[in-house]
Image (cartoon, rainbow, N blue to C red):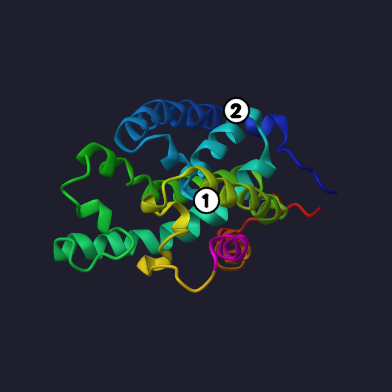
């Protein structure tokens, strides 16, 4: 039988209420720091959107919302964390995706908040292991991306390179007209991030012994 939401009894468990409160406190701290340091455009990064959506999922008890973000934060964390560790070892010289973490021109506190890329994947996987994982998650995340990517292109400063719409992987985008590249990214995000993250989540949950929570539409 398919279910969208977790059982009320599961969501009402004390540890989940505690997680919701602690994560909310984190967001109350994080949102003003990012707004002050980088401006509201920065919330359009897919990983930053993930935090906001996970917060909403915790308070609305929406398993589908939660499941839509797990694969994204998990796969990003798997790439981000080793890159950051290489940067720490080399003083920033070997960092690629996390080079901004070693940029002294950026506020230290704002850079420190990016460490959520390490703990958020662990939290997200624990949550779906606890309340169940909805296999429709990557479909919803693809819809989120289909909105967020063109909005990013329309309202953000290209120099910010938010969601890599100007310089994917640090390489200037000169191959396609901008609208065509935006459409291409709307396809590439699901293919390279959302669905691989979904499969990685399923593998990890299987390893953790998850069975009950897998939900099919």
Q: What element carries label 1?
A: helix
Relative placement, left or right, of 196 versus 96 is right
Q: Distance between the residues labelled 1 and 2?
A: 30 Å
Q: Single out the mark in the foreground, 1 or 2.
A: 1
Say if residue 188 shows up in the picture. Answer: yes
How many other residues sit within 10 Å of disc 2, few (<14), some (14-19) or many (≥20)?
few
Relative placement, left or right, of 1 versus 82 is right
Figure quadrant of residue 59: top right
Q: Which residue is drawn at 66% across and 47% down?
A: 132
Q: Which of 182 and 9 is in front in this view?
A: 182
> In this view, which residue lies farthest toward the bottom?
175
Picture layout, residue 16 above or below residue 185: above
Q: What element carries label 2?
A: helix
Count of picture labels? 2
**Magenta stretch, residue numbers:** 177-186
Q: Name the residue under label 2.
A: 59
Q: Looking at the picture, how far across and down is residue 154, in whole percent?
A: 54, 46
Q: Earlier in the sequence, mark 1 or mark 2?
A: 2
Q: Looking at the picture, how far across and down is residue 81, in whole percent?
A: 34, 59
* Main secondary-structure element of the magenta-colored stretch: helix
Q: Residue at x 14, y 61 (%)?
A: 91
How many other residues sit within 10 Å of disc 1, few (<14), some (14-19) or many (≥20)?
some
Label ID, residue 153 = 1
Relative placement, left or right, of 87 versus 215 is left
Picture layout, residue 178 above or below residue 47: below
> In this view, which residue lies farthest toward the right?
1
Say if residue 203 shows up in the picture. Answer: no
């Amino acid at each position: 039988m398919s279910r969208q939401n977790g059982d009320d009894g599961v969501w009402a468990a004390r540890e989940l209420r505690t997680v919701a409160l602690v994560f909310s406190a984190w967001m109350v701290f994080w949102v003003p720091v990012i707004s002050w340091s980088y401006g509201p455009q920065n919330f359009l990064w897919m990983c930053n959107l993930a935090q906001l959506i996970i917060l909403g999922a915790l308070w609305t008890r929406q398993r589908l919302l939660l499941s839509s973000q797990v694969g994204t934060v998990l796969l990003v964390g798997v790439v981000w964390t080793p890159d950051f560790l290489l940067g720490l070892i080399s003083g920033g010289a070997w960092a690629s995706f996390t080079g901004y973490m070693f940029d002294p021109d950026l506020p230290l506190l704002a850079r420190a908040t990016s460490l959520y890329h390490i703990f958020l994947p662990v939290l997200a996987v624990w949550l779906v292991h606890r309340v169940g994982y909805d296999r429709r998650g990557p479909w919803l995340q693809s819809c989120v991306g289909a909105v967020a990517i063109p909005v990013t292109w329309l309202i953000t400063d290209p120099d910010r390179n938010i969601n890599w719409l100007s310089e994917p992987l640090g390489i200037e985008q000169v191959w396609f007209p901008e609208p065509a590249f935006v459409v291409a990214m709307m396809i590439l995000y699901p293919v390279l991030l959302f669905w691989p993250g979904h499969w990685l989540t399923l593998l990890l949950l299987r390893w953790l012994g998850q069975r009950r929570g897998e939900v099919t539409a």
